């Protein structure tokens, strides 16, 4: 009985403590919830992994872009290093050619302007002088208007004197000649640079830094020889010493001398190791060039320098005489109508002074004396340049480094206005037995 009671109590306790078994729908919902939770966790994990992968890819892409940029920069540097050596020099020469063309245009415009100055100022001063002279002549015969006439004559004569002094200082005809010559030389330089560029475009040829430096030196020398502005770098129109014009840089002489050159100069049998034929040079051609060089120095250049000195002396006197005569005429005009002897000769002096001043002004600027002086300087400069070119070739020991002899002979003949056969007569002039006083013929026929 006691055992049965114990079993009843155990069964009741178990019934109280254990929960009722879940229904089938509840079990299905729980399993679905578990599956959804696990799926959510899986998707979150997948998205996290995807995000991590995307970030890694972006970082990798960023580093790849940097690497690509670095590779591009290295490729660009390598490409620049692989460019032809003369590529930069070609661009520089093109810039020089454009600058030379621009300078030629500017000098041409300014040259025409200054030529207009010469004509306008010439006629203006002559009109002032002649009008004043006419008023001075009429003043004594017109008593009511004597004061007005003599005052007008004096003002016009004084104005003409001041204007003539300024014009004589700048010499417009000489300014115009400077610009004309500068235009020609700038165009010549442009053609030279264009020819160098065309030669550089040929196969197996390059433009070197020496070509660029030579072109730049010629540009600077031309700028210094023929400045564009009028003040303050205007060339002196009345120099103390007459020298040939110089528009080219100093000739660069080679310092190296070959052993054969030294041996030849130490001997008396031959004067130079280049007597053998090479690069178009022969001993006869060298003697010919030495003879031409001597004739140019003794006759051609000296002749034009002497004429230039004479023209300069005449121009100085004319430049002083014109303003002085006009000023004296203005002073005499102030005494027109005065009592006594001064009033008697004042009118005649004013008229004579004005007329003489107009005549001097016409001779000086109508005759373009300043232009003639500049022309003499320029022609003497042409002969001086020829001398330096010949000397530079003859002093070079290595004939291969000279300009081709036949080409150089042709250039010299063209500059002198002669044929190459006519140049052979100057070989005898290279002999020390011939004195400078014995040379009668000029080397140049063209200028």
Image (spheres, rainbow, N blue to C red):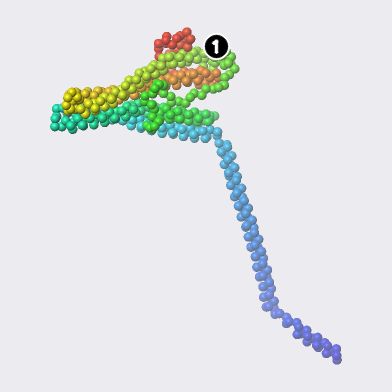
Q: Looking at the image, can residue 360 be seen?
A: yes
Res 110 quadrant in image = top left
Residue 337 lies left or right of residue 267; in this view the side is left
Residue at image location 52% in from the left, 14% down from the top: 282
On the image, numbered disc 1 is attached to which residue?
270
What residue do we see at 31% from left, 24% from top?
319
Q: Residue furthest top?
A: 433
Of the pair 373 and 210, the residue shown nearer to us = 373
> Residue 96, relative to residue 312: is it above or below?
below
Above or below 282: residue 234: below
Q: Quadrant of residue 40?
A: bottom right
Work out which quarter of the rendered image holds the C terminus and state it. Answer: top left
Q: Residues within 10 Å of mark 1 (few under 14, many from 20)?
A: few
Give the farthest residue toward the bottom: 1
SS of the residue at dot 1? loop
* Closer-to-camera residue (361/276): 361
Q: Residue 85: where, in percent of width, then height? A: 55, 33
Q: Residue furthest front?
A: 340
Give the x, y percent position of residue 372.
Answer: 34, 22
The percent position of residue 416, horizontal first and vertical second, equals: 41, 18
Going 75% across and 82% down the picture, which residue do you hit? 18
In this rendered view, identify the residue nearer to me: 433 or 231: 231
Q: Position of residue 175 (x, y in %)?
A: 35, 28
Q: Quadrant of the N terminus?
A: bottom right
Quarter assignment of residue 351 = top left
């Amino acid at each position: 009985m006691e055992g049965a009671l114990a079993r009843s109590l155990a069964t009741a306790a178990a019934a109280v403590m254990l929960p009722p078994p879940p229904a089938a729908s509840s079990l299905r919902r729980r399993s679905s919830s578990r599956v959804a939770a696990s799926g959510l966790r899986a998707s979150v994990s997948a998205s996290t992994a995807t995000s991590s992968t995307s970030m890694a890819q972006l970082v990798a892409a960023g580093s790849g872009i940097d690497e690509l940029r670095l590779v591009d920069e290295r490729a660009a540097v390598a490409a620049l290093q692989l460019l032809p050596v003369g590529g930069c020099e070609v661009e520089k020469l093109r810039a020089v050619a454009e600058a030379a063309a621009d300078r030629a245009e500017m000098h041409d415009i300014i040259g025409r302007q200054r030529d207009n100055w010469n004509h306008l100022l010439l006629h203006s001063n002559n009109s002032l002088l002649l009008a004043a002279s006419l008023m001075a002549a009429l003043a004594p015969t017109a008593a009511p208007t004597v004061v007005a006439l003599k005052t007008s004559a004096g003002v016009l004569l004084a104005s003409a004197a001041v204007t003539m002094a300024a014009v004589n200082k700048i010499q417009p005809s000489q300014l115009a000649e400077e610009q004309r010559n500068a235009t020609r030389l700038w165009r010549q330089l442009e053609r030279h640079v264009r020819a160098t560029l065309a030669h550089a475009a040929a196969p197996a040829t390059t433009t070197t830094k020496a070509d660029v430096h030579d072109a730049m030196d010629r540009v600077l020398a031309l700028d210094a020889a023929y400045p564009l502005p009028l003040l303050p770098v205007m060339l002196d129109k009345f120099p103390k010493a007459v020298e040939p014009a110089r528009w080219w840089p100093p000739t660069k002489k080679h310092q190296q001398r070959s052993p054969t050159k030294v041996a030849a100069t130490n001997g008396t049998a031959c004067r130079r190791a280049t007597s053998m034929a090479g690069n178009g040079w022969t001993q006869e051609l060298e003697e010919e060039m030495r003879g031409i060089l001597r004739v140019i120095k003794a006759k051609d250049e000296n002749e034009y320098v002497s004429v230039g000195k004479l023209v300069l002396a005449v121009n100085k006197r004319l430049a002083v005489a014109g303003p002085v005569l006009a000023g004296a005429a203005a002073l005499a005009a102030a005494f027109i109508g005065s009592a006594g002897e001064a009033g008697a000769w004042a009118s005649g002096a004013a008229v004579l002074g004005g007329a003489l001043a107009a005549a001097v002004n016409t001779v000086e600027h109508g005759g373009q004396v300043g232009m003639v002086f500049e022309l003499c300087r320029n022609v003497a400069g042409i002969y001086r340049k020829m001398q330096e070119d010949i000397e530079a070739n003859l002093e070079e020991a290595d004939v291969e480094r000279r300009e081709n002899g036949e080409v150089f002979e042709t250039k010299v003949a063209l500059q002198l206005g002669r044929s190459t056969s006519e140049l052979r007569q100057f070989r005898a002039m290279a002999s020390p037995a011939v004195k400078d006083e014995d040379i009668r013929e000029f080397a140049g026929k063209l200028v």
